[in-house]
Image (spheres, helix red, strand yellow):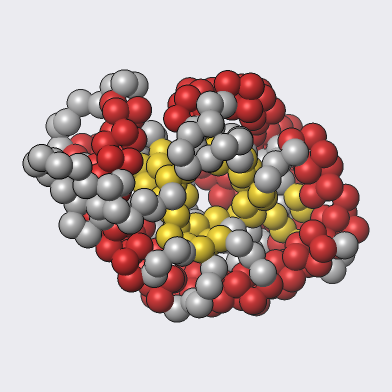
Amino acid sequence: MLDLVAIREGRSVADSLAVALATARHAEALGFARYWVAEHHNMPGIASSATAVLVGHIAGGTQSIRVGSGGIMLPNHAPLVVAEAFGTLAELYPGRIDLGLGRAPGTDGITMRALRRDRPETEDDFPREVTEVQRLLGPAQPGQRVTATPGADTNVPIWILGSSLFSARLAAERGLPYAFASHFAPRQLLQAIELYRSQFRPSAVLDKPYVIIGVPLVAAPTDDEAEYLASSNYQRVLGILTGNRRRLQPPVEHFMAGLHPEERAAIGDFLAAAVIGGPERVHADLGRLAQITDADEFMVVCDIYDPDLRLRALDIAAAAMKA
């Protein structure tokens, strides 16, 4: 599961953090393999900006599920700081920490400058910084002048995240596992997976391609209820597309019917990989995604306004995967 740690309308940031931990515990009980949180900044509806802190909080409140970043946005951080933070987490929670790395800033230009001041960023920086993080988390070398402490020798698993062919190509060249952000940018999903698999070079950490795809999920006992609950997602996506970001809103009856056709189409494109429905539809749609992508894992993004109904949705999805 990928958690954006949504701040719900009428509720507090503290509540959203508590919901995240409760959801992680529920996902662990259901047998989910991993629970990631995403780095975003200066967004009124997302509480996961201090990503490494939140990873530690969730890992400390669970027992066995892998916890990680989906992802850390490298343009915002010095590689040494990333290695030290995740090296510390790996020492605290051995064998349970994942480090997903992305090359987008996860915010606007003004906020990016506030994060890293006026440091210019180019396309070539990301591959070089990934290499630096790998080196800092790997075995310390004789004469190495800068060592991540903690960090060195922890070998925290690194994932390349992305929504483009650039990230697919980099993950393939490095022989690293790849997570595609089809939960918000599904357009190049199949092309990126094909490129990654065809160009993959085995490495010391991975002998064959390994792919996660993001899947927006809204599940309920009936298709109609799921569609109603999904209106919270539709409102958020419309806010992203129009520059009117808000907290996660309560569901609204017949929300899509009140929109212009162009707005409905844009939301549909954004959520083209979404699975929304009752148990039978969820089972069928997850099966369809598995067939067309042959993904090794689905990483669901399940933002439902009522936290209890969110847990119910995970129950339905888990049952569908086992059916």
Tell me the quarter of the picture where residue 178 sits. top right
Given the current orientation, which residue lies at the most extreme right position?
280
Q: Residue at x 53, y 40 (%)?
A: 206
Residue 321 picture quarter: bottom right
Along the line of sight, the residue nearer the viewer: 13 or 119: 119
Q: Residue at x 64, y 65 (%)?
A: 32
Q: Is residue 173 visible?
A: yes
Left or right: residue 189 compared with residue 10: right
Residue 65 position in % (x across, y down): 54, 68
Looking at the rendered image, the quarter that the C terminus falls into is: bottom right
What is the residue that sits farthest to the front in this orientation?
A: 142
Q: State which quadrant residue 50 falls in.
A: bottom left
- Residue 132: x percent and y percent? 26, 36
Q: Position of residue 11 (x, y in %)?
A: 46, 73
- Total labels drawn: 0
Q: x and y percent of residue 294 in the render?
A: 75, 38
Q: Residue at x 55, y 56 (%)?
A: 2
Q: Is residue 55 above or below residue 300?
A: below
Relative to 237, say whether 276 is above or below.
Answer: below
Q: Can you say which quadrant of the picture contains the N terminus?
A: bottom right
Q: Nearer the viewer, residue 26 or 277?
A: 26
Q: 250 or 123, which lies in front?
A: 123
Is 306 positioned to the left or the right of 92 in the image? right
Horizontal relation, residue 66 to residue 39: left or right: right
Q: Residue at x 50, y 70 (%)?
A: 20
Q: In the image, is residue 83 above or below residue 143? A: below
Residue 164 visible, this angle? no
